[in-house]
Amino acid sequence: MTTKKTVIVTGASQGIGAGLVNAFIERGYNVVATSRQVSTSNAFQASDKLALVDGDIGDAETAALVARTAIDRFGSIDGLVNNAGIFLAKPFVDFTMDDFKKLSSTNLEGFIHLTQLVVRQMLTQKTGGSVVSITTPLTDHPIAGFSASVSMMTKGGINAISKNLAMEYANQGIRFNIVAPGVVDTPLHKDNPKGFLKTLSPMAGISNVEEIADAVVFLTEAPRVTGEVLHVDGGAHLGRW
């Protein structure tokens, strides 16, 4: 496939984010990749199709720089993947307001800052576009003994706003979808026992980054799909197993 479209990927320095950057480049997209230290991550080969922007996505100035880089370097913004996110697991009564502020800054404020800029640009271009955000099946399908309520409050908020935005901008051809991965083999789980992780879905396995990237690319390119939550979780969202 060849394309001259430009996609932004947040949280791009490792794991799912890095896999997404490479998948889009392989498909011919221009990519703006951002994370706190993406320029020193050594996750990518230099390419004239790739621009790297360092910064905290919870900071409005970072979002502005990312959007400006896409437009100045490549001339358009056609897709956004809100992959950046932080996750904390602990009993509800142990969450602090500092925890909440950290979760909200990255997971919610980061979404708002950059997605607003992207939608404004897409409205100007009048050629539609795609926004795919990464959340988790745990927002609506919690697992007993796995406590992450305040984290899920923020991720569930992204699910809710994405469905509302899908309706708000349907007439403009701007689509909003969700990919909800289960356990994925990324640095996030490097210290977790693989045997335990495999029990967290009825298909009894761990997803790889490429499987998540394939789901994101599909939604980015699916012209009639909007407001969808695509679970890539080995069936974990179906219920007890």
Image (cartoon, grey):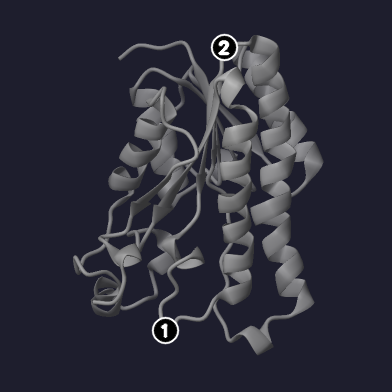
Q: Quadrant of residue 151?
A: bottom right
Q: Residue at x 72, y 29 (%)?
A: 117
Residue 56, can we see it?
A: no
Q: Residues within 10 Å of mark 1 (few under 14, many from 20)?
A: few
Indicate the amino acid at tag 2. Answer: Thr
In this view, 189 is above or below 186: below
Q: Can you identify the residue that label 1 sits on? A: 144
The CA distance from mark 1 to mark 2 is 44 Å
The residue depicted at 35 percent of the width and 46 percent of the height is: 212
Label 2's element?
A: loop
C-beta proximity under 8 Å, tags 1 and 2 = no
Quick check: 63 left or right of 233? right
Number of residues whose C-alpha sits closer than 10 Å to that of mark 2, classed few (under 14), some (14–19) or many (20 or more): few
Towards the viewer: 168 or 137? 168
Q: Name the disc covering residue 116, or none.
A: none
Residue 115 image point, x, y percent? 67, 36
Does dot 1 land on a helix, a strand or a loop? loop
Q: Position of residue 33 (x, y in %)?
A: 55, 34
Q: Which mark is residue 127?
A: 2
Q: Where does the image place residue 178, in percent across and percent down from the top left?
A: 47, 45
Q: Is residue 225 above or below residue 187?
A: above
